[in-house]
Amino acid sequence: MSKTIFVSGASAGFGAAMARRFAADGHRVIAAARRADRLAALAAEIGPALLPVTLDVTDAAAVAALPDSLPAAWREVDVLVNNAGMALGLDPAFKAKLSDWDAMLATNVTGLMHLTRALLPGMVARDRGHIINLGSTAGVYPYPGGHVYGASKAFVAQFTLNLKADLVGTAVRVTCLEPGLVGGSEFSAVRFGGDQARADAVYAGTVPLSPEDIAEAAAWVIGLPAHMNVNRMELMPTCQAPGPLAIKRQG
């Protein structure tokens, strides 16, 4: 059955790949992001199955107004994909920029919460729907320089489980997708302030996951029987695994 799917952060990377996959599967996609030009190009590519919506998830007033601002035929959102997110910097916590921490929390935590709160009541009232939150293996396995990014994704995982607890007995589903190493997106370039050479080095000698792989996982979760809820799904390429605990030995 065709669904109306809202995807945040849809102008590139995971979001754009999911918009393409969902439309190819016969769904309608509301593609939201800050970059209107990227959304316009995506709409021209996909056609009438995609509605572009210029939105900054850190703008609380715009997010709160979202449900009533959508065209009437698009207001019954069946699936919300909270994909908008970012990592900034890889310096240790004692050198990190507070402005980077604030920006990550505003997008990865507060923006996700506000968008969920805006669209979830409609799902509950209709007794159907699905929220997919984009977490990360960084929320499970710590690494040097991961501090606030990893903590924000740990929040996403626990928020997802707590939503599930609130929604028990309804037909609204909640899932946290937790990818590991994924190439082919702007993630590392953004993290390193546009330093493409440094970003490329992250994936040198690997076969990472791709945005299309993440879209495949989201499409599978959405297509499961309505009574079946995937709470969390962790994804890694075969070249990646959790590492050992760090031990500093005295010489």
Image (cartoon, rainbow, N blue to C red):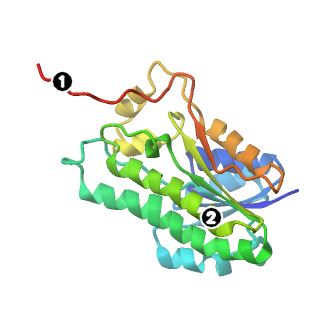
Q: Residue at x 58, y 39 (%)?
A: 234
Q: Which mark is residue 249?
A: 1
Question: Where 146 sits versus 79, above or below?
Answer: above
Residue drawn at (19%, 47%) of the image: 95
Q: Position of residue 112 (x, y in %)?
A: 52, 63
Q: Which mark is residue 165?
A: 2
Crowding at dot 1, Cα within 10 Å, few <14 / some 14-19 / many 20+, comes out as: few
Residue drawn at (82%, 56%) of the image: 226
Residue 148 at x, y percent in the picture: 35, 52
Q: Is residue 57 visible?
A: no
Which quadrant of the figure has residue 65? bottom right
Name the one closer to the observer, 138 or 118.
138
Which image quarter holds the N terminus?
bottom right
| Numbered tag placed on residue 116 in the rendering | none
Q: Secondary structure at mark 2?
A: helix
* Whether residue 28 is visible: yes
Helix or strand or loop: what does disc 1 sit on? loop
The residue positioned 73% from the left and 53% from the top of the image is 229
For the C terminus, the image quarter is top left
In the displayed orientation, state which residue is furthest to the left: 251
Vertical placement of residue 59 versus 149, above or below: below
Nearer to us in this view, 203 or 225: 225
Which amino acid type is marked by label 2?
Ala
